[in-house]
Image (cartoon, rainbow, N blue to C red):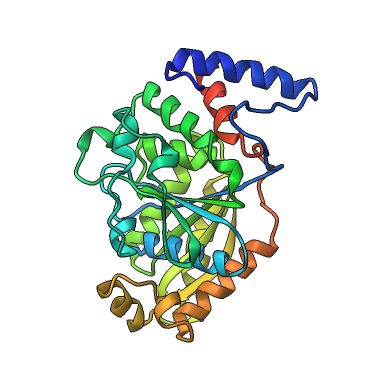
Amino acid sequence: MKSNNPSDNVIRLSDRMKARKTGIAFESAAQTVRKASTRVIAVTSGKGGVGKTNIVANLGYSFARMGQKVLILDADLGLGNLDVLLGLAPKYNLSHVFMGEKSVGEIIVEGPGNMLILPASSGIQELTQLTPEQKVQILSELDGVIDSVDLLLIDTAAGISSNVMDFNVTAQEIIVVVSPEPTAITDAYALMKVLSLKYAEKCCKVIVNLAGTTQQGREVFRQLNLVTERFLDMTVDYLGSVLFDAKITKGVKQQKLVSELYPDTRASKCFEDLARKIFTQPPTNVPKGDSNFFWHHLIEKKIS
């Protein structure tokens, strides 16, 4: 049985790190099978309203259709709305985990395409700035479920808060969503600047949402890449764009994914192409670890 005491968790994790350094495989008593690797991707944005959550959900659906077992973590802890977007009505969410009433495994719900969803709470201001103890708690809980999936997608909140940054830097890959609006481009650069200068991130990927044409998507990326190349020690890769499609709005109103409701529309094709490209490309970053990536980052932060 896992301890709920954060100090005990850190001690236990320190022992695990020592075992890994000596090449000894660590097996959790609570798990019978541990996957060699779970791919972890954080999807983030500098500005709200660029369609980030919609992109996460549709990408997850596309990955699931490719045979991947997908878990989406709604990491907008104070204003989560992934469940609303998907037409779900979960009885419990992450606030119940923090209150000690439920475990992460007990609040997971199934979404479209057999995706698994970890719903966040909404309207709880205290969860917008987690304490170090709460971070230990949620990461400990995630460690118990992450190895049962092929892909973990983290839908962060928008902006540059400590919550957002912690989820970003613990992932193996970071995807920044931006739209053609000048303010969205400016805020995307601000996010990348913080990731580069404060957290020493060396790479991120970009998806341009709501592009009028593929050419406009490339132009938005060109503008963003121009300033990052000049001022930041960071490589920025272009994944592609999601073209503006009125069918997305229709799907949102029906609380259905456009990829599910209108699979042949141009936006759905964009999501399919993006998922296929991400799936076939290995992570650009030097891997930050396997499914224990959370623990590595946590211990590093505790030591520093």
In this rendered view, identify the residue nearer to me: 168 or 154.
Answer: 154
> Does residue 218 appear anywhere in the picture?
no
Q: Is residue 233 above or below residue 243?
A: above
Name the spot of residue 61 as percent of width and height, x first: 49, 66
Identify the residue shown where x is 37% and y is 42%.
160
The image quadrant of residue 256 is bottom left
Q: In this view, does 124 lie above or below 237?
A: above
Name the spot of residue 145 as percent of width and height, x first: 53, 40
> Does residue 163 appear anywhere in the picture?
yes
Q: Is residue 139 above or below residue 182?
A: above
Identify the residue shown where x is 29% and y is 55%.
81
Q: How many marks?
A: 0
Name the spot of residue 51 as percent of width and height, x first: 36, 64
Q: Is residue 281 left or right of 51 when viewed as pictured?
A: right
In this rendered view, identify the residue nearer to me: 264 or 200.
Answer: 264
Name the spot of residue 300 as percent of width and height, x first: 57, 23
Q: Is residue 197 left or right of 52 when viewed as pictured?
A: right
Identify the residue shown where x is 75% and y is 28%.
25
Residue at the extreme bottom of the image, as rendered: 264
Identify the residue shown where x is 58% and y is 67%.
275
In this rendered view, identify the residue nearer to me: 3 or 240.
Answer: 3
In this rendered view, identify the residue nearer to me: 25 or 190.
Answer: 25
